Image (spheres, rainbow, N blue to C red):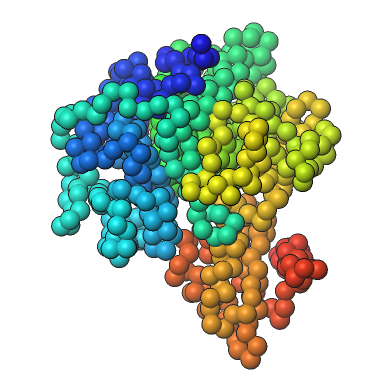
Amino acid sequence: MAEQVQMGEITIGPETTVDDAQAQAVTAYADREAVVIGEDRVTFGELGDRIDRLAAGLYKLGLQKGDVVVLLLPTCLEFVYLYWALSKVGAVVAPVNPLSRQAEIAHILADSEAKAVVFAPNVSGNDLMAIMQNVRGDLPNLSHLIVRGDDAPQEMIAFDSLMTSKEPRPPEGINEPDDLWALLYTTGTTGAPKGVMHTHRTAMGQLLGIAKLAAAMTEAPMSQIGSLVKLTLKYGTRYVKSAGKQRAMLALPPLYATGGHYCARSSLLMGDLFIGPEHFHPVWALEMIEREQASTLVATPSMFRLMLDVKDFDRYEKSSLLVVTSSMAYMPPKLAQRVRERFKCPLMIAYGTTEAGGVTATGLSDTTKVATETVGRAASGAEVKIVDNEHNEVPRGEKGEIAVKWAGIMAGYYKAPELTAEVLDDEGWYYSGDLGTMDKEGIFKIVGRKKDMIIRGGQNIYPPEIENLINTHPAVHASAVVGVPSEIYGEAVWAFVVPMEGQTVTPQEVLRHCRKDLTAYKVPSEVRIVDELPMAAGLKVQKYKLRRMAEEERAA
């Protein structure tokens, strides 16, 4: 029999589907509060009722097993309902950043052959209503445009109208473990977003690892007198006081980001209260820790830095926190130490990817050096190794590419077998492109990236996408984009631009050109006009020289 794991009060295993797990959770925790977003609050019982109503509405609309539904929504209750309801009809959920520009949205809708899209009319000034009206005529597979709220233009559907009845009910047991559950789009190295396929089995594989990791890091130390005494001496009686109480997770990454909905999925299936921000603000985050008595805080390094910089940080009550977790970007050791000292609780630094989920993390009882300078040990059930360019494992302590093998790895890239073959081998190993080391104790450290990806405020940015756009400017001959260390965002985006011979172009013109088609976080922070780019043999740009130039300029 396949291994079964207790996750809170429900039981999951490799054969469990996402809709099975959700049905267990809303029954097991019916009277508990489930979600708080802004001023909206729902219990697990209410959540289950609304998921059933929405599933009936989607089924009545004609959505069938395998249909892809793109979500262009900010963090909101509607996102939570859809995330679970779509699996009840066998549809595939595809969350997309609602701040994306028209070209990127059109590409994803076409590539995924989406049958429906659910969107908010306007998100932070991004006019999604206009975008959808512009692109719908070029998307023959897109049958349903669903607008958040209770009103919709002609030929569109108001979201609220889908939740009026629990009939007709979708068939029970519609999903098999290896059916496609989610399509998570990530920007590719060529600039075109590619879809990461996760099945019900891979989704559960990630949760099985999380359930065991949570037990190892929180429940196990609580049950061991020695560990409990050490934690109490260091952080006070918060662990003793939390015994038997419902945990509350405040997850600051937006739900449309992989880290955001990953937190929501694990939190709700554990029976915890999930708290999400409609819009991130550091003061709001501190207020919510105090108001909701949050036991877990999940944030990116840049979010932590902004919270620590709040003028009256120490006046907010934070003693309910059992652990704070950093993910989605590199955590500098000095910032990690500040987080531990100011929040007065352990910091768990996690490492993962959209393709593989969370695969390593530090623990509550780790030494200061491990807790602030590494990403900890592999999750239960995950094999992680460091390899060279030929995929041979390197000796402990040597730098190489991080490779992962476990049940949570993606099924592949959607409609891209050649890209899949580049990162997944026949034995099931996923090659992440991240560079790291592993010491004799099995502790991992991230030291860089094999490819040129930039991580700005927790968002992945691939320079070719920006370079390709800059190069379309009529006065531009060539460009190169690099990531430069930034205290606020982890990395800043710098663009070096060579004008066409006999022409001139200004940094302001380059930025205006970028803002027309790039999502805001991809727009360069700085633009420098140069006579030429440093080139190596083979006509490859020596980007390390550009980074050095930028760092020297910043230092001056």
Does residue 343 sit above or below 301 in this rendering?
A: above
Q: Residue at x 19, y 48 (%)?
A: 158
The residue lying toward the viewer, choosing from 101 and 528, is 101
Residue 547 location (% of width, % of height): 72, 63
Q: Which residue is drawn at 38% across and 60% down?
A: 106
Image quarter (top left, top right, bottom left or bottom right) of the C terminus? bottom right
The residue lying toward the viewer, choosing from 134 and 457, is 134
Residue 109 appears left or right of 430: left
Q: Quadrant of residue 403?
A: top right
Residue 395 location (% of width, % of height): 84, 34
Q: Residue at x 73, y 42 (%)?
A: 401
Q: In which quarter of the image is residue 162?
A: top left
Q: Quadrant of residue 378?
A: top right
Does residue 460 sit above or below 3 in this rendering?
A: below
Q: Which residue is drawn at 66% across and 32% down?
A: 427
The residue lying toward the viewer, choosing from 165 and 282, is 165
Residue 378 appears left or right of 252: right
Residue 5 location (% of width, % of height): 51, 15
